[in-house]
Amino acid sequence: MLEAYRKHVEERAAQGIVPKPLDADQTAGLVELLKNPPAGEETVLLDLLENRIPPGVDEAAYVKAGFLAAVARRETSSPLVNKEKAVELLGTMQGGYNIEPLIQLLEDDTLAPLSATALSHTLLMFDAFYDVEEKAKAGNQYAKQVMQSWADAEWFKAKKALPEKITVTVFKVTGETNTDDLSPAPDAWSRPDIPLHALAMLKNPRDGIEPDQAGVVGPIKQIEALQEKGFPLAYVGDVVGTGSSRKSATNSVLWFMGDDLPGVPNKKGGGVCLGGKIALFSLTPWKMPVHCRLKWMSAS
């Protein structure tokens, strides 16, 4: 498994992009290695477990959650992951297959405090919310703790405060940017692979924009040169995001200008949107608004 994965890493590096997240089969192979780790590979195996498996309801997340739950329940073991570490990692999986074992562990005298902490910072509970509520009404002190934490919005208050000053390097894109400039329709096949799809952003030349390979690869070298200044990049244009509201367009911009998300491979978040007029589309919970009409900002 490691040999095949390292070959994949090399192939992606040749394209200038990071490897894909682990799939279900790779994660199953990883689980077996974690149970009996080869000497010298311990750090690599833990990094793959913690950072290269998608959270949520991905098939690989199902395998990961099943392994961690089994460790927490003492049904299996790993010299690299004890039961406390297993609960901690379950708490990073955002929602989905990790929820049921975490709720069960509220009944575990040893692990309940860790499980309560993990659930307190998990929002994608859906109907499982009522399972926690039921335990709280039945007198489970840790379920009560979780309910109170949600009510007090501790998940939000624990976030870093907005800094008083944000210094950015401007990536200036002249004229109007539509979503097809950021997520071209001919490259729709690559949209699920965010790092690969982002290579096509602004692949067509325009004033001030120099694609690495016109019509194929966007201005990656130009973006990297700006990143060397040491500040986050800010995409600045006259009008940004007209056209259809594509989450993939937002993902392309975020890939170069966003922040890494711990435990979430190949996705980024963050960013600041400033504009004289902002039209918010796609306000469904699973989509991020991308249509922002921005005016030029001048810096003193």
Image (spheres, grey):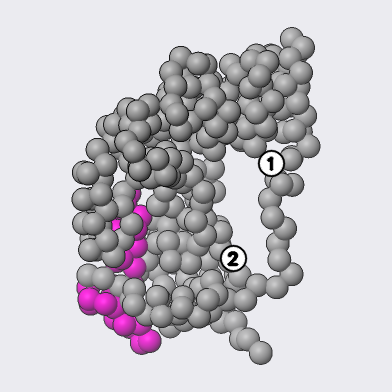
Residue 38: x %, y % from top left: 32, 36
Q: Tell me which label, 1 or 2, sits earlier in the chain.
A: 1
Residue closer to the observer: 75 or 165: 75
Q: Is residue 49 left or right of residue 117?
A: left
Q: Which residues are magenta?
A: 190-215
Residue 175 in sight: no
Tag 2: residue type?
Val
Q: Residue at x 55, y 75 (%)?
A: 231
Residue with the mark numbered 2: 272
- Name the image quarter holding the N terminus: top left
Q: Residue at x 48, y 44 (%)?
A: 263
- Name the image quarter holding the C terminus: bottom right
Q: Is residue 85 above or below residue 105?
A: below
Residue closer to the observer: 189 or 150: 150
Q: How many marks?
A: 2
Tag 1: residue type?
Trp
Q: Secondary structure at mark 1?
A: helix
Q: Is residue 128 left or right of residue 252?
A: right
Q: Is residue 27 above or below residue 105?
A: below
Give the number of the mark in front: 1 or 2: 1
Residue closer to the observer: 102 or 172: 102
- The crowding category of the residue bearing disc 2, from other C-alpha atoms within 10 Å (few below 14, some 14 to 19, many at least 20), is few
Residue with the mark numbered 1: 155
